[in-house]
Image (cartoon, rainbow, N blue to C red):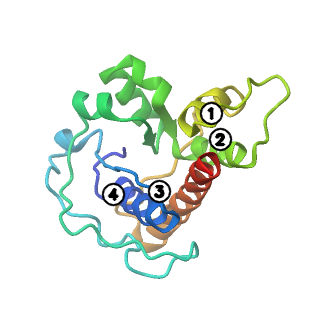
Amino acid sequence: MCTANICRSPYAAAAIEVAAAKAGVDLLVTSAGVRVDMLETTGYPTCEDMPYAVERPSGWRVPRPAEHGSSQVDLELVRSADMILVFEPNHRAHIVNIQPRAQLRTYSVMQIMRLADAVAAEHWPDAAPEPTGDVLRDLNLARSWAPFSASDTVPDPHGHGIPAHVKAADVIDSMVANLIRAIVTRHA
């Protein structure tokens, strides 16, 4: 989930799909924005400045979603999600306002980078409960030692030129690599 669902979240959804497919993991990924209705951007295509279809440092090419039209997050989407990734603290607040119980399934992109890396490598603190082998449950168990932080922000690159978009994509690619590695490690 991002703000207008035209830069960060559609890129992240596409990157997760590419990385999951390469790893042989079947995931259903959706993106939406928390301010699409307010910004009147419903149906907008993806941002032209995001680095789609170019070789990324991660080794994959993220295709531009052909049929993307920005959409507003709603209660049905929040309820149906096993995991919700957000780019800014206010996105998390919006999700939790829609459904308070969703806070247990909502992670910042920066937080998931820290947690997924630890879960994949099984760097469990001595005081932590034993890992379950289920990546979603293990990520939730690990939350206490990598809590959500107000500084967990991937700045919105929209309107800030191609370098800002590439920087956001680099962070997203790192998060995706960690997340998919954690999923593959837990399913191995």
Amino acid at dot 4: Pro
| Residue 47: % across, % down | 29, 66
Frontmost of labels 3 and 1 is: 3
Circle 4/circle 1 CB separation < 8 Å: no
Q: CA distance from mark 2 to mark 4?
A: 22 Å
Badge 3: how crowded within 10 Å, few (<14), some, or many (20+)?
Answer: some
Circle 2/circle 4 CB separation < 8 Å: no
Q: Which residue is mark 1?
A: 138
Return the disc, 4 or 1, that comes first in the chain's sequence. Answer: 4
Amino acid at dot 1: Asp
> Quadrant where the N terminus lies?
top left
| Residue 75: % across, % down | 24, 27
- Badge 4 element: helix
Q: Which residue is mark 3?
A: 25
> Can you say whether 44 is above or below 142 in the image?
below
- Residue at 64 percent across and 27 percent down: it is 141
> Can you say whether 134 is above or below 182 in the image?
above
Disc number at residue 115? 2
> Can you say whether 19 is above or below 112 in the image?
below
